[in-house]
Image (spheres, rainbow, N blue to C red):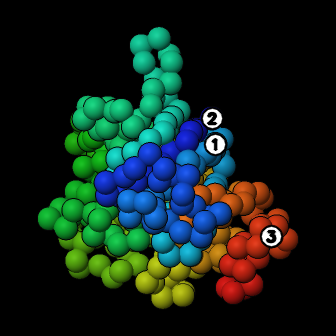
């Protein structure tokens, strides 16, 4: 199991004991009527196996991006547990990443996981060159040899169709689609077990979107990492994922094979979501 999530919740604001019970898909609200706290994620349980690609869909405010941020620890969970393959104690027992210290977080982010953000500015350091951004990740994963670092940067730039001759150019000298490719290069350069993607093609031209999606699909098959993809675009989900979960008001309302979810949705909300987009 690459990823296991147990009873994961995130509450924004000062909460009360009844927040999780009084919000969610059943109440059609993520705002607690007692204390007005906002429940971004409400008792989510998920598992992801090696090589699987999981899609998370839902309307704006459904909690899908918050869930991804909790996995990557961009935000701290209020309750719950998250386990990632190879993050264990000295006895080999899985450790909850919610309780990770700073040193452990460096290990989790530089070796076990990587994130690709919708906005490349969140995933790239614009004070570093394209190669420097990749080098930052490679060094964090334990490689110290300048020659090996440079070779890895050239390799992944080439893989993502960025001219290697531009390795020393800074990100703001590239187009939006190229910046996203550099971010992909950086994310994959540490050979992560788990790749997280938050709306990776939003804001890009359709032709660029198609190339980015094909690139991600080819690299996933070639390298074999698992993926969790958040998107409001069901075309992206259909193109990339094996399994899909549907979120509403912070809760998962339906889970299944992607083809089944898109072609024969069972939950009324999923039916509405699919019919309104497709």
Q: Residues within 10 Å of mark 3 (few under 14, many from 20)?
A: many
Q: Which mark lies nearer to you, 1 or 2?
A: 1
Which residue carries the number 2 mark? 1
The answer to which of marks 1 and 2 sits earlier in the sequence is 2
Residue 180 found in image quarter: bottom left
Give the CA distance from mark 2 to mark 3: 26 Å
Q: Position of residue 105 (x, y in %)?
A: 31, 38
Q: Residue 35 bears which disc, if any?
A: none
Q: Residue 265 bears which disc, if any?
A: 3
Give the CA distance from mark 1 to mark 2: 7 Å
Q: Residue at x 72, y 80 (%)?
A: 272
Q: Which mark lies nearer to you, 2 or 3?
A: 3
Q: Position of residue 245 (x, y in %)?
A: 66, 60
- Residue 151 to residue 111: above or below: below
- Disc 1 is placed on an element classified as strand
Q: Nearer the viewer, residue 109 or 146?
A: 109
Q: Residues within 10 Å of mark 2 (few under 14, many from 20)?
A: few
Give the CA distance from mark 3 to mark 1: 21 Å
Residue 131 found in image quarter: bottom left
Cβ–Cβ below 8 Å for labels 1 and 2?
Answer: yes
Q: Quadrant of the C terminus?
A: bottom right
The answer to which of marks 2 and 3 sits earlier in the sequence is 2
- Residue 270 to residue 115: above or below: below
Judge whether residue 82 can be spotted in this image: yes
């Amino acid at each position: 199991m690459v990823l296991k999530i147990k009873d994961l919740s995130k509450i924004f604001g000062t909460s009360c004991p009844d927040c999780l019970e009084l919000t969610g898909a059943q109440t059609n609200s993520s705002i607690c009527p007692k204390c007005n706290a906002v429940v971004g994620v409400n008792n989510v349980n998920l598992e992801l196996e090696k090589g699987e690609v999981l899609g998370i869909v839902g309307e704006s405010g459904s909690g899908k991006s918050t869930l991804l941020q909790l996995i990557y620890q961009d935000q701290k969970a209020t309750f719950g547990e998250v386990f990632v393959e190879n993050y264990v104690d000295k006895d080999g027992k899985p450790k909850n990443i919610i309780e990770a210290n700073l040193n452990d977080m460096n290990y989790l982010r530089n070796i076990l996981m990587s994130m690709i953000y919708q906005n490349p500015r969140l995933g790239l350091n614009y004070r570093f060159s394209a190669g420097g951004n990749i080098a930052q990740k490679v060094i964090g994963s334990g490689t110290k040899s300048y020659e090996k670092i440079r070779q890895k940067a050239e390799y992944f730039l080439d893989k993502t169709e960025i001219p290697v001759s531009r390795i020393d150019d800074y990100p703001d000298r590239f187009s939006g689609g190229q910046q996203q490719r550099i971010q992909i290069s950086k994310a994959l350069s540490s050979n992560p077990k788990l790749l997280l993607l938050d709306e990776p093609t939003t804001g890009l031209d359709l032709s660029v979107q198609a190339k980015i999606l094909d690139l991600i699909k080819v690299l996933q098959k070639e390298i074999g990492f698992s993926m969790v993809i958040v998107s409001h675009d069901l075309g992206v989900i259909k193109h990339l994922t094996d399994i899909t979960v549907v979120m509403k008001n912070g809760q998962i309302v339906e889970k299944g094979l992607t083809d089944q979810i898109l072609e024969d949705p069972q939950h009324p909300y999923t039916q509405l979501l699919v019919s309104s987009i497709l």
